[in-house]
Image (tube, rainbow, N blue to C red):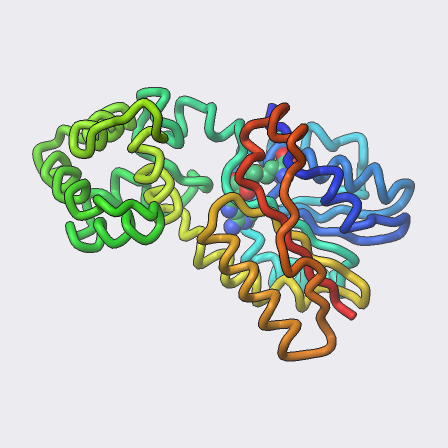
Amino acid sequence: MHQPVLIKEVIEFLAPHPGGVYVDGSLGAGGYAEAILEACSPDGRLLGFDIDEESINRVQVRLKTYGERFRCWHAGYHESKAVLETSGVDGVDGIVLDLGLSSDQLEDPGRGFSFKFSSPLDMRFDRTKGKSAEDLLKCLSESDLAKIIYEYGEEPRSRRIAKRLKEATKKGTLTNTQELSDLVMKTVGYKRSKIHPATRVFQALRIAVNDELGNLKKGLEDLPTLLKKQGRLCIVSYHSLEDRLVKLAFKERARQSERWKNLMPRPLRPSVEETRQNPRSRSAKMRVIEAL
Ligand SMILES: C[S@@+](CC[C@H](N)C(=O)[O-])C[C@H]1O[C@@H](n2cnc3c(N)ncnc32)[C@H](O)[C@@H]1O
């Protein structure tokens, strides 16, 4: 099961209290959600969102014992403002976002997030709608694909990779994650000491398929406005593109109005002990803003 990252720190900064109302915008396996419900017992509430229907179904089972204290929606955190307003929620005491994907998604061979398995090129968090990675590879032009690989994967050899991917897509020889990984490796080579060359291409496609940065920008606009006084928004991110957006949005909000305090001009990182126990946490960065 997914091991929550920076969970002690999230709870410390969110400081859930009895009677409070909290939002977990990206439930995943429900690790943060459960910890928040425990911390705000006996009567605090947790409202949760995830765009992955399977995650919602699993978390509903995991958190069943909390009864009406827990409610969730199969919807994005970027849509949560409208959902909460129509549900009559008038301000919340804290919000947490844990970006990216869960280990459950990464390790599910059917989802296409990992090049360790041979799976269909899907990569959608929400499998009920949208274009899969295979659809995207087919419909993007070579130059748009190169741009995505360059910008979202921070891969300098993006043009060469995009050319080979488009050729293979046209020939019909690019239909699964193994073929994608092999082709990237053949195109740019592999040095054992470096990260696998497909890592960046997989990251880029996943970000594009799920419009992760677009959703984050919308969330950064909407979510702070849901906070009551002294309410905090904690965001845990896993790569520099996300962290940059969070950093700039929090800094700008605090600069424009005294209503906001940027509690972490420098991000909080996991301890050496946590990265040893859970290597997935190594790239995590947490930032927090408070409504004054
Ligand atoms: C890292 S996991 C969260 C793990 C969680 N904190 C836990 O303790 O189990 C990220 C989750 O965010 C979900 N997700 C990604 N984009 C989302 C969005 N825009 N809105 C809601 N959920 C999203 C993914 O489906 C995934 O389940």
Q: Which residue lies furthest to the front in this view?
A: 193
Residue 149 sits above or below residue 222 on the image: above
Residue 264 drawn at (x, y percent): 68, 58
From the viewer's side, name the closer residue of 272 and 262.
272
Quadrant of the displayed image that contains ligand 1: top right
Q: Is residue 180 left or right of residue 240?
A: left
Query: Which of the 4 image quarters holds residue 257?
Result: bottom right
- The residue sitting at 25% across, 47% down in the picture is 156
The quadrant in which the N terminus is found is: top right
Q: Is residue 209 above or below residue 120?
A: below
Of 194 and 70, which appears nearest the observer?
A: 194
Q: Quadrant of the C terminus?
A: bottom right
Q: State which quadrant residue 280 falls in.
A: top right
The answer to whether residue 40 of the structure is visible from this angle is yes
Residues 44 and 106: in front is 106
Q: Determine the residue positioned at 62% across, 72% down.
A: 253
> Viewer-proximal residue, 121 or 205?
205
Residue found 63% across the figure and 23% down from its top: 277
Q: Is residue 100 left or right of residue 57?
A: left
Image check: 97 left or right of 202? right
Percent across and percent down for residue 199 are 35, 34
At x 38%, y 40%, the residue is 203
Q: Write down the quadrant of residue 110 in the picture.
A: top left
* Percent coordinates x, y for residue 103 in the rendering: 53, 29
> How many discs mark residues in the rendered view?
0
Where residue 287 sits: x, y (%)?
64, 54
Q: In the rendered view, would you say 19 is above or below 229? A: above
Q: Can residue 51 be seen in this view?
A: no
